[in-house]
Image (cartoon, rainbow, N blue to C red):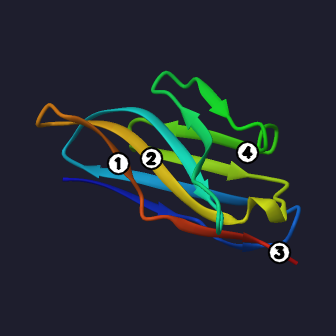
Amino acid sequence: QVQLVESGGGLVQPGGSLRLSCAASGRIFSINDMGWYRQAPGKRRESVAVIARSGSTHYADSVKGRFTISRTNVKKTVYLQMDSLKPEDTAVYYCNARILSTNGYENDYWGQGTQVTVSS
């Protein structure tokens, strides 16, 4: 099986920084797109940032210039560096990866979610 395990969430004051990590493990042949999504209370899950295997990135307008997504293909890990955090960034953040398993099937996998709270 394939698992995504996230870490790095927590409570931070406005203007502060956090770094999220998400490590993939299991019967992985290759990993294509990796990304971060978030869901605030009462709102739909939204895309925050996505990074292709090539390294090309895409960001939501609301986080451009403040968040940076990166990945290490060897470690099968994706990161989200979040700077200049705002209260409206408060949400549960989920890692996502499109993974080709060793059985030949490609699927989208999700992490368990990590809470990020921005508050004074």
Tell me, for residue 67, which label it has, or none.
4
Say which label, 3 or 2, has the lower sequence index: 2
Q: Spatial distance from mark 3 to mark 2, Cα to Cα?
A: 26 Å
Looking at the picture, tell me which residue is in the foreground, 10 or 42.
42
Residue with the mark numbered 2? 96
Residue at the (35%, 48%) spot, across then down: 109
Query: Relative to residue 29, is residue 60 drawn left or right?
Result: right
Residue with the mark numbered 1? 109
Residue with the mark numbered 3? 119
Say which label, 1 or 4, has the lower sequence index: 4
Look at label 1 and name its amino acid: Tyr
Residue at the (61%, 28%) spot, across then down: 57
Q: Position of residue 48 (x, y in %)?
A: 64, 44
Q: Position of residue 117 (x, y in %)?
A: 72, 71
Q: Is residue 113 above or below residue 77?
A: below
Q: Secondary structure at mark 2?
A: strand
Of tags 4 and 2, the one toward the viewer is 2
